[in-house]
Image (cartoon, rainbow, N blue to C red):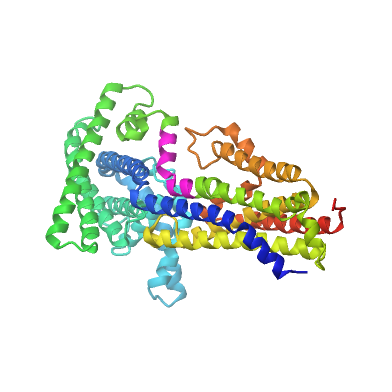
Amino acid sequence: MFSKALFKQSMKANWVKWLCVTLPTVIMLAIVIIVLGNLGINDIRDSLSDVFTQADQESYLKENSIDSYNLYLTSVELEGTFQNMDESTLTLVYDYILTPYNQAIDEYKNANDGQEPTGETLETIRNQTIDQVKILLSLAPQLSFLTSDQQIAFLTALYTTYDQDRFTSEDESFADKSKALLKEAYLGVIYQGAYAQALEQETTTQELAAYSATLTRTMIEQAMASYTAPEGEFDAEPYKEAATTAVNQMMHDVTYKTYYDQSVVGGMTDEEAGENAELYAVTVKVLSNTAISTYELWLAELGDVEGAQEQAYTEATASITDQIPEKVSEALSELGNMDIYSLIIGSIFYRIAGLLLPMVFVIMTANGLLAGQVDSGSMAYVLSTPTKRRTVAVTQMVYLVVALFAMFALLTVTSVIAVWISGGNAFAINYGQILLYNLGAFLTMFAFAGFCYMCSAIFNRTKYSMGVGGGITIFSLVCTILGLFGSNVIPSAMRISAMNFFNYLSIITLYDITAIMTGSLSYLWKFGILLAIGIVTFIIGIFRFDKKDLPL
């Protein structure tokens, strides 16, 4: 089934071709990886990405500033609402919210020989009472703005504070205690909301979130304390300057602590960290002041127009990316997220340029191993010896596969060394990905080798073998080149979607670079198909050559 002499003869006849194909491909690959690794080719992409990240951060800070500004003014007005509550309203609040809680506590005490509920038991009573009465908050005009989560936070804070002094509606200071209790519950909502919002940022620690929430609560508490009863209806104008100053300072302090902590962790001294943090904090303070000023200017300009507040908010929080056309913004965002290394090394070199010379080798060698020898008459000499046809076919197949394997083994070693020179796993493409690139390229060429070998076994004339095997192989490469301009690796601004049709005409499409880069395992079944194509076509070639009539 295998002839060493014939294998050595094939090696001797084709080694020059192998060398002339392998060395240039290896050199090209090394140059591409090393040059790209030292050019910082992703710098422009990273700059675009930074622009969008900074724009999003800027927009977030503006939104936070204006939300805090509106919260300040709303809280001042709510303080007026609390202060203006008459005793009958406060009694109604007590009856519907505090009485069910007191009843639940009394029931527990009666069932436990007068023992006061504590710890988890008291918390359970609170939660059960909250479930019963939270719906009532939405019926109170003064508290109807609370969301479902805020209602729970409000009642939790209210009951927790009430446990410190369980007054009754008969107390002489009932009104003052009730107003203080409502205010404390509202401040609890403010704290919980600010804490949860701060934790939405990935880089925010629990400590920083608690610090931010405490500052917000303190600011709102001071805002409510600054309320003075107006002669007529509430007017927010006298409080706007104080609100702006308070919000700007809060944004400054939160930013300062954030960057101070990050700088210290990064290895800076306390003095260096302080200077770095102050620089960022002042920048954010100015940004906050600008956002609030812009918001107020838009409100003044729009006047009583319907939706004025929403439009003013949108205009004041707009970032640079919001001011350019949507399609342009999407295109720039896509460019910012594009991996140029994988585009050049993966999609252009490994799937196109890196396959070109190996294809030439496969087409010429596969044709020469069988059809070329039949056409020239040298096959008659080979078969005049005791060597059987199947032995010839198997030996020539083994040589072609071994030659391809050796070629891509050398390419793999070269690519790994080149990646190491360019920074190892710190390079945009890591060792695991580069190994999969080479495996995919080998399997693709294995499939083409099997097809060209099958054509060489079927046809007795070189022109037919080269025409069909080589023609379809080159056609696949050309389709891949054209299909590249319609594939997802090309930014949408430059992509010609109709060109993607050509990808369906080439088996190189099964060499899925994108799946390798993204970590998806979908490339496995595609690699399996390439391997199957190669095996099946080699087997067909062997059996066809063994059974066909030869013009000897």
Image position, residue 27 (x, y; %): 45, 54
Residue 353 magenta: no
Residue that appears at 34% across and 42% down: 44
Q: How many marks?
A: 0
**Depth order, front residue of 172/139:** 139
Give the farthest residue toward the left: 271
Asked where in the image residue 487 lies, by quadrant, the reply is: top right
- Image quarter of the N terminus: bottom right
Image position, residue 124 (x, y; %): 45, 66
Residue 522 shows up from this direction? no
Write down the region rendered in magenta. Answer: 329-345
Is 257 situated left or right of 15 in this image? left
Asked where in the image residue 60 lies, by quadrant, the reply is: top left
Residue that appears at 25% across and 52% down: 217
Residue 334 magenta: yes
Image position, residue 270 (x, y; %): 14, 62
Is 142 situated left or right of 215 in this image? right
Is 300 situated left or right of 431 in this image? left
Image position, residue 149 (x, y; %): 42, 51
Q: Main secondary structure of the magenta part?
A: helix
**Depth order, front residue of 300/422:** 422
